[in-house]
Image (spheres, rainbow, N blue to C red):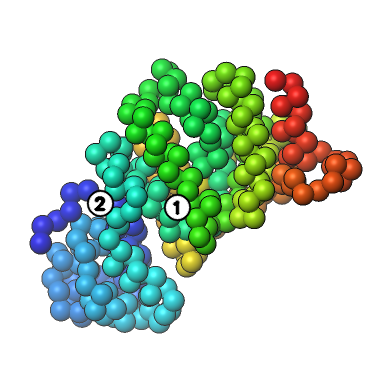
Amino acid sequence: MGLRTNISERQRRLGFELKQLRELADLSSGEAAERVGMSRGQLSHIELGRTSVLTERLVDLCQAYGCADEPYIKALIAMSEASGKGWWTAYKKHLGSGALNLAELEDGAESLRVHQSLFVPGLFQTADYARAIFSSPKLGFGNIEEALMFRMERQRILTRQNPPSVHAVIHEAALHMRFGSVQVVREQLLRLIELARLPNVTIQIYPFSAQAYAALSGNFVHAIPGTPRLGTVILDHATGSDYLREQAQLQRYSALFARLAENALSPVDVSLAPEAHSVKDSLALIQHLLYTL
């Protein structure tokens, strides 16, 4: 079997986890390979995500490393046996690996924590708002129609059976950005209120008047699967995406998101009676912005 030339984040993550287990067991790659009857080169390719690993061999490796965490091992097996194919596969020829990795990570998450400072998060965007972003010449987006269809299809996870819980903290600055006409912005703000009605969606606005955590954190998505230690923080930037996998990094961003949520306005809650909104909250801010458009 040839080596992979296009390695997905899931495949890289499996290799990363196996390498971490080996290093925690204080074994060299040669020592570990010998224990399970493979060559050092084979193990190296597995750890780099360049080739697959049979389930039996994966279990042997975990045993050789002294790992007895059954739920974790089962999660590694699921990662190994997954085909990686989903609705996003149809976009493989049109979009980069970053978009495909994000869709696969979102699809496998039980919860998503999102912080965005200049855009409404992609999972919440209306088609017209997204098109206005993709059409902005200074942002340099290509494949606009494919990117738009891809973004709209990503949003299906919000209303699918057993959807992930999605908690987003959006900086007030994002709500002032004018992507498209006034009507486009208005419909986008109304869309946020509509989505907040979903039981699995929590939306908070981080106001200009709050502490500066939002300015210091940058934008990120923390995708958390059923086994939280296998979560991933995705940092998106102009040249691609970075994926944070180490436990210290995940804990750092988990704590950072908790601080963002603590300092943001209380979540949009359309179930409350008008008199219950006696203090500033996310809904009141969005309604104020709608009034001023």
Q: Residue at x 61, y 25 (%)?
A: 185
Q: In this image, 156 relative to 113: left or right?
A: left
Q: Can you tell which mark lies on residue 106?
A: 1
Q: Residue at x 47, y 62 (%)?
A: 225
Residue 273 higher or lower than 176, as above or below: below
Q: Are marks 1 and 2 in contact (CB under 8 Å)?
A: no
Q: Residue at x 45, y 39 (%)?
A: 152
The residue carrying mark 2 is 7
Label 1, label 2: how far apart the Cα atoms are? 18 Å
Mark 1 neighbour class, 10 Å CA radius: few under 14, some 14 to 19, many 20 or more? many
Of pointers 1 and 2, the one earlier in the residue sequence: 2
Where is residue 115 drawn, in percent x and y?
A: 57, 42
Amino acid tagged 2: Ile
Amino acid tagged 1: Glu
Report the quarter where the C terminus lies: top right
Question: Which secondary structure, mark 2?
Answer: loop
Question: How many numbered tags mark residues here?
Answer: 2
Residue 231 seen in the figure: no
Question: Which secondary structure, mark 1?
Answer: helix
Residue 287 higher or lower than 43, as above or below: above
